[in-house]
Image (cartoon, rainbow, N blue to C red):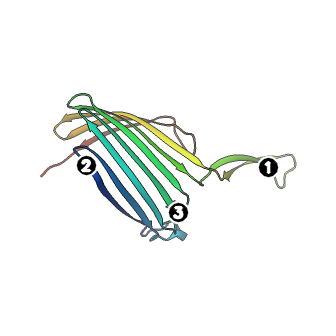
Amino acid sequence: SVSGIADAAVRAKYNVIRSGGSGLSVGGEVRLPTGDDDNLLGTGETTLKPRVIGSLERDRIAVHGDLGYTFGGVSGELNYGGAVRMAATPRITIVGELAARRLQSIGRLAETTQAHPSLTGVETVRLTGVPETTYRALVLAGVKWNIAGSGILSGHLMRPFTSAGLTSRWIVALTFDHSFED
């Protein structure tokens, strides 16, 4: 059991172009190795992640995109995503998203079969790390319903596009959000 401060993240974003709900921004994140990496509270390395974020809104449809790359740390990582949002009615919004990442050197688990070291004729199956580029992608489709006032009921269905790592076939999320005002 361990407790303490983990790595600290410092983020900044600057709007280069802004016009209503449309715009283009640049940003970045620096992760500082403030956590104790010997006790799994940090990585022990500084990382830098520059980003570009864009949005285009017209009438009832909006398109958003995000692109970033992480330098340093455990692995170089390309992050990218996009979303489409449509206001179907004044109270119902339909959304679709893609979130993906490419990890340069994390690798994957693979089964290996080896002869047992002391039992003749017995083979053992082990999981071994295989260093290779890994891709992860997730798609999401959903509906948001403004029930009344500031109450929003959301239903989303998510599906991994890739099979790397521990993944489930389908993920269902139902949420209720409410904003309390003074």
Residue found 21% across the figure and 32% down from its top = 91
Residue found 51% across the figure and 54% down from its top = 77
Residue found 54% across the figure and 57% down from its top = 76
Q: In the image, which is nearer the foreground, mark 2 or mark 1? A: 2
The answer to whether residue 34 is left or right of residue 123 is left
Disc number for residue 73: 3
Circle 1 crowding by C-alpha within 10 Å: few under 14, some 14–19, many from 20: few
Disc number for residue 114: 1
The image quarter containing residue 171 is: top left
Work out which residue is located at the far right of the displayed protein and give it: 120
Q: What is the C-alpha distance between the residues marked 2 and 1?
A: 60 Å
- Disc nearer the start of the sequence (1/3): 3
The answer to whether residue 45 is left or right of residue 56 is right
Nearer to us in this view, 68 or 74? 68
- Disc nearer the start of the sequence (2/3): 2
Q: Which residue is mark 2?
A: 18
The kind of residue on which mark 1 rests is Gln
- Disc nearer the start of the sequence (2/1): 2
Assign a secondary structure to mark 2: strand
Nearer to us in this view, 100 or 175? 100
CB atoms of marks 2 and 1 within 8 Å: no
Circle 2 crowding by C-alpha within 10 Å: few under 14, some 14–19, many from 20: few
Residue 73 percent across, percent down from the top left: 52, 63
Residue 70 percent across, percent down from the top left: 48, 57
Residue 67 percent across, percent down from the top left: 43, 49
Assign a secondary structure to mark 1: strand
| Residue 39 position (above or below residue 66) | below
Work out which residue is located at the far front of the displayed protein and give it: 17
| Residue 94 position (above or below residue 12) | above
The kind of residue on which mark 3 rests is Gly
Circle 3 crowding by C-alpha within 10 Å: few under 14, some 14–19, many from 20: some
